[in-house]
Image (tube, coloured by chain):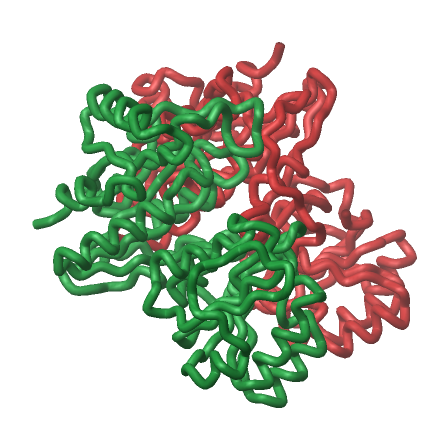
Chain colours: A green, B red
Amino acid sequence: MLKTPYLLFLGDAADQLAAKVAQGIKDWRPEFCVGQLRLPGCKADLGLPEMTVEEARAAGAQTMVVGAANRGGVISSSWLSTLTAAAEAGMDIAAGLHNRLTALPHLVQAAERAGTTLFDVRVPQHDYPIADGRKRSGRRCLAVGTDCSVGKMYTALAMEREMRTRGMKATFRATGQTGILITGSGIPLDAVVADFMAGAVEWLTPDNEAGHWDLIEGQGSLFHPSFSGVTMALVHGGQPDALVLCHEPTRTHMRGLPHYKLPSLEALQELALETARIVNPDVRVAGISVNTAALSDTEAETCLREIEDRVGLPTTDPFRHGAGRLVDTLEV
Amino acid sequence: MLKTPYLLFLGDAADQLAAKVAQGIKDWRPEFCVGQLRLPGCKADLGLPEMTVEEARAAGAQTMVVGAANRGGVISSSWLSTLTAAAEAGMDIAAGLHNRLTALPHLVQAAERAGTTLFDVRVPQHDYPIADGRKRSGRRCLAVGTDCSVGKMYTALAMEREMRTRGMKATFRATGQTGILITGSGIPLDAVVADFMAGAVEWLTPDNEAGHWDLIEGQGSLFHPSFSGVTMALVHGGQPDALVLCHEPTRTHMRGLPHYKLPSLEALQELALETARIVNPDVRVAGISVNTAALSDTEAETCLREIEDRVGLPTTDPFRHGAGRLVDTLEV
């Protein structure tokens, strides 16, 4: 559990996309963000107040979140003095890149001296149990995709926001490093040991009030040969009452696998329901979330209508048009 | 890869069942076994020559395999002096229990001095890649079950033996600690990090000659909520050309989950084929393997006939009646 609020560290991000983690935090948890810290040459800008480490600390920042990646997806050596200064100033540091904060000796020493904590959110922080499959109270909605990286996280975050706006009780449950950094807690499911995957998901989505919804971030795809096992653990550990089918209509093949075509939304619906019914016979599909970022307004409208007519389920792009139509079907 | 031949260490096994790993090695790899070593009070007996560490070493033993478990499934402190003596005598030691050989300081020091190796086969020994889903040459058969622990490993081992007897090229591929100890190599799939599960299975079952069969040991069940993700990684990483459906007819509920009923063999066939077709559209079911250990001869015969009539697939108990009928359908 990361301490809030955050100072968002953008480093020397080469463009706005390189700071997409920070952008996600700003988009979905603006109340967590006291400011941004950019190094010389940084091309990303979140429009937050520019702050030094000292200014952020004075403004109450508890954690500096590394919200950017350099080309290799690693913590850059040119960032080290700033990270160390933040630790020395009494801030925790959180990052989800490929190399670990805790593998940087200078930083580790600084954090030890200051009594601050380094959070590598790619590294599981708990010993998760083996799943027991017991029926839990409260409700759960899981985003599943025709492929990886089709918008499952944004769909779940948008549904959480819409539910809260309507006064429903709802909690986004992060299962990947970006989601963990955005919301401050969760499980890095793809780094969990195989035997404990489903148990980690159960741990993440425990018993809750009858009307409460967990919006569970999906990972991978039941149809993606590299990561389908992780997805299966989410379906069975998550015990979903509702599924949202996520899709990116311009994708020509499975991500990273040029020899694999995407499944149809109908095939996803069939397999996701078939597997989810094993743990919850009453599971249903709430709707379809289409990532239309690559389409014009007109193209997006046509695409959404075509899918809705064909599959017969409420279909929307929650980032473009809001998650209202997905939430409508879940409101009691 | 463990060095053969083995001295099988039975410790002070309380009964024959406590030495089931050693029994498996004796049953399936008798040519690996030079002898057995039993401590006072041992109630298990494999009928192998009794040997001291020195006698086994003189007879050529390269590895002492811990083939028994005490009540807690851990390496007993009363075994330590024998394990240390074996390491000092120049033997590697292999074990698959819950605590690790490498966590025993005295043993580690002895092995270092003697230049021998300690193999904890529950611990992954490689950095496995992320699966790429590429079509591989050679053929693969995967055992899938209606539940955990229904005889998937014995089915694959029996099929390997039958294929080799017929002059077919065949390799059992172990995916759990018992299978690894029996055959000397494999992957401890349930201990692999989630992202690399399917890649580990691809690594285990690489390109091979056109007529060669990998017989892949199954794990868990697509219908077992605790472990279905591991099974899914086997289905997609294993890229099976053939499936064998494994079942235990007296099981009243999913193992460890009293609130979950077993699926029918028909439901298993449907879901296993549906998921396997994602990576291999030509996959088919070779037959059904029923573990009839709990039934009398007459009951077993009735049970097998009833299932074969109902499902319409060759049905046998490969341990009781041999794997001939399963292999018949795979012979070109």
Residue sitting at the far left:
A332
Q: Identify the image quadrant of the N terminus of chain A.
A: bottom left
Query: Is A34 situated left or right of A283 in this image?
Result: right
Along the line of sight, which residue is nearer the eye, B256 or B234?
B234
Residue sitting at the far top:
B332
- The residue lying at 68 percent from left, 21 percent from top is B137
- The residue lying at 41 percent from left, 60 percent from top is A25
In percent of width and height, residue A129 lies at 42, 63
Q: Is residue B119 among what the camera can see?
A: yes
Q: Is residue B248 among what the camera can see?
A: no
Query: Is B274 situated left or right of A277 in this image?
Result: right
Please determine whether, in this image, residue B194 is positioned above or below residue A129: above
Along the line of sight, which residue is nearer the eye, B159 or A320?
A320
In percent of width and height, residue B125 lies at 71, 53
- The residue lying at 25 percent from left, 35 percent from top is A316
Quadrant of the rendered image containing residue B16: bottom right
- The residue lying at 51 percent from left, 81 percent from top is A91
Query: Is B30 situated left or right of B249 in this image?
Result: right
Along the line of sight, which residue is nearer the eye, A14 or B76?
A14
Along the line of sight, which residue is nearer the eye, B88 or A171?
A171
In percent of width and height, residue B264 lies at 30, 32
In percent of width and height, residue B282 lies at 50, 15
Query: Is B141 situated left or right of A179 in this image?
Result: right
Q: How many marks?
A: 0
